Amino acid sequence: MFGKIVTILLIVFSSNCFGDVKIEKDWLGLDKKDSWQFYTGTGLLVIDTLQSRYISKTKNLRESNVILGDSPSASKVYAYNIAVIGINYAINRFSPRWLKNSWNAGLISVEIYCVVGNHGNGLRVYKKF
């Protein structure tokens, strides 16, 4: 499953990075040239949300996100991640390009670290809750 997710992310990345891309808006109003960053970051946030939800349902696991705390409720996990996705959208939609690129580089790096680390610790997004 994890290999499929990485493959999908690589396809999304490569399909939008190569070739002559015109600066047009996609259906969310984002520049098509930079939208891969938003979708990659949001996809990783969704995976992290599912992993955090699993942590919230399991008593012997601890959440590493200090904002959520050691054992957050499912509603706190969803509220936090919806807020981050909203901030991600606002930055990608309304900010100058240098800020978008900096934000997305940081977000994608942190989320890859979290998702891969959680996966290495045995967390999966496809376990039944």
Image (cartoon, rainbow, N blue to C red):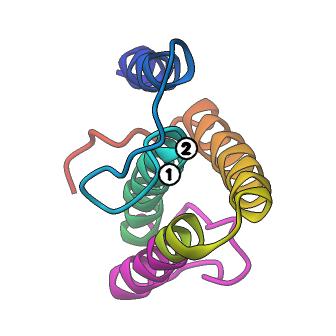
Is residue 59 within the magenta segment? yes
Q: Does residue 23 lie above or below 13 as drawn?
A: below
Q: Residue at x 79, y 58 (%)?
A: 98
- Mark 1 near mark 2, Cβ–Cβ under 8 Å? yes
In the image, which is nearer the foreground, mark 1 or mark 2? 2
Please tell me whether mark 1 sits on a helix, a strand or a loop: helix
Give, as a three-letter code, the residue at label 2: Asp
| Residue numbers of the magenta segment | 58-87
Q: Position of residue 90 (x, y in %)?
A: 51, 76
The image quadrant that residue 27 belongs to is: bottom left
Distance Cα–Cα, label 1 vs label 2 = 7 Å
Residue 66 belongs to the span the image colors magenta: yes
Question: What residue sits right under mark 2 in the picture?
Answer: 34
Q: Tell me the residue that label 1 is attached to.
A: 38
Q: Position of residue 82 (x, y in %)?
A: 40, 77
Q: Identify the residue shown where x is 55% and y is 44%.
A: 34
